[in-house]
Image (cartoon, rainbow, N blue to C red):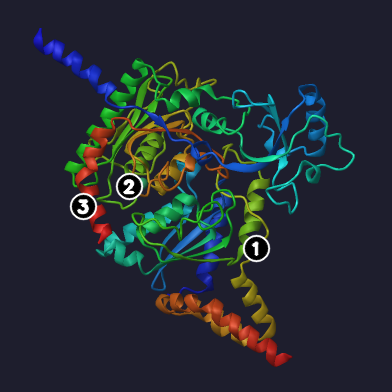
Amino acid sequence: MEPQRKRRKGSACDTDSWVAYPVLSDEQSQDVELIEAFAAPIVDKKETSRLVRELNGLYPMITLQHIKRVRACKEEGSPHPLEVLVCLVSDAHGQEKMVSIDSLLPSDFRRDGLGEPFVVKVPARPPLTRPQFEIASKHWPLAFHEDKQVTVALKGELFSPLQKAKMHMYMTTALTAAKAGREGGMEAVGAVAVDPAMDRIIAVSHDCRGKHPLHHAVMVCIDLVARSQGGGCYSYDQYPACHFSSPSSNPFENTSEGEPAFQPYICTGYDLYVTREPCVMCAMALVHSRIGRVFYGTTSADGALGTKYKLHTQKDLNHRFEVYRGLLSKQCEDLNGLEDHFEKEHLKE
Amino acid sequence: MNCSFTDLEENTLIAKDALSNGEVPVGCLLVHQNQVIGRGRNQVNQSKNATRHAEMVAVDQLLDWCRHRNRDVRAVCERTALYVTVEPCVMCTAALRLLHVPVVVFGCRNERFGGCGSVLDVASADLPRTGTKFKVCEGHRSDEAIQMLKTFYKQENPNGDQTHTHTHTHTHTHCVHICVLCTFLFPHLFISLFLLPFFLHFDSFSLFFNRVPSFLCLSSFFLLFSFL
Ligand SMILES: [Zn+2]
Ligand SMILES: [Zn+2]
């Protein structure tokens, strides 16, 4: 009774011990940028729709389509109920920040119902995430086209307990491979390629830098995936912890005649679990291989999926993918903990 | 064996071989002290491994070369130059850094994946744990490299999606411009300063490369003034 209870409790706690957070693009994760604009009180509410229409014609503010032109007045008991954006400070050429409404509007503009302008700060770009929206809307009301998945992911709640249990299992496999690599004198990094549609491990690898300086765990994993498809360039027979399984071992899939049911193409649709954030070479190798998603445990100093670069969100590249960090972060950190600490100290000197 | 124009022509031949095999026509040579110790062409389709770029194939040959001669890989790489028809991609650029290769000479730019300035500048980025930064010289025989890529993208690619390069005709750098200017003004200077290094020892070659652009720039200004 006692051991069983302990085990159940242990595994439940394990999946609760980590949270998978998305690694978002710079645009999605940066601070809200503000830009100065002139606003003016609408003292006569009946003039509102005319003023908005005519101001839109005069100062269209094309770059600020996400901003609402009118806002309800913030302070209670304010003499005017509404405020309207007149123009950007940069639109009013060479104006001081203390201006009169007359200097902002042409003489034929009917300024009935409009009060004297004042400077406000409005968000310069449309918000891409809920945190950005919440901060931005404190400055001026704005529209937000919410990506619900990003909102849930940012809260660390994207994956169900069942999904987390699977992710936990795959990362544990990567950790085991990493330890095997470390025992062989290599860096303690492990990787696992998974076909999420079949819930199946395609390849398991660890760092093999002993024989080849570029055989980082991810590069080995990519080559093992190629092996599983009848390609590949290297033999890792001397590393028993590096292995692959062919996705077409099902006899119904691999008929010699007729249409093949499904031909896997490089890493398309596969997930990669790796104990630490890939370097530039490995991250770009994953772009070339059309990886589906990447999950890593801990960040690395020169990492290219979040730390130094975000290759998975790079606009100029032809393939993008989702990246999540933090899986079994504690265990993954412990793998490299001592080395990293030593290297950091070394770099400081 | 000299690192002469025959070697550089061989580079083009390797790329042409890739073209006839349905791979992206990128050819490269690794030259260590006047000797070609690695050559490669794209093997992505053949290996079903999207990382089998010409540079990676050539690096494997370099490693074999070191293994057979019992030479230290890092020591060899530190005295090796890469000649490649197209700017190395981000992955290969990082790989060359990790190997501590000090000089890369390429023909045309790689606007889709280039790691030496086109998409990212990984060659000179501050990445203390990703090997050593390296020097880049671009524009060498770029017209031929571009022509081959154009041929490649015109012909039907039997393996569908193929990813390596996309080129712009605007590939000549100021380095090449200055060289052209110099040839125009004073051919002997061009021959002695730009061509000669290729026939010399690699060490002197790299030494020259550090100085050639500024040297040529100064010389061309000097010549311009003397003409006026
Ligand atoms: Zn790597
Ligand atoms: Zn490459």
Q: Secondary structure at mark 2?
A: loop
Query: Which residue does the numbered mark 2 point to in the structure image?
Result: A215
Residue A105 visible in the picture: yes
Q: Secondary structure at mark 3?
A: helix
Q: Residue at x 58, y 34 (%)?
A: A139
Distance CA(mark 2)–CA(mark 3): 23 Å
Query: Which residue does the numbered mark 1 point to in the structure image?
Result: B143
Mark 1 and mark 3 residues within 8 Å of each other at the beta carbon = no
First-in-chain label (2 vs 3): 2
Image quarter where the C terminus of chain B lies is bottom right
Counting other residues with Cα less than 10 Å from the Cα at mark 2, is it few (<14), some (14-19), or many (20 or more)?
A: some
Observer-nearest of A211 and B180: B180
Observer-nearest of A272 and A103: A103
Chain under label 3?
A: A
Disc 2 marks a residue whose amino acid type is His
Query: Which residue does the numbered mark 3 point to in the structure image?
Result: A342
Q: Residue at x 35, y 38 (%)?
A: A221
Disc 1 marks a residue whose amino acid type is Asp
Report x, y in % for residue A106. Answer: 85, 43
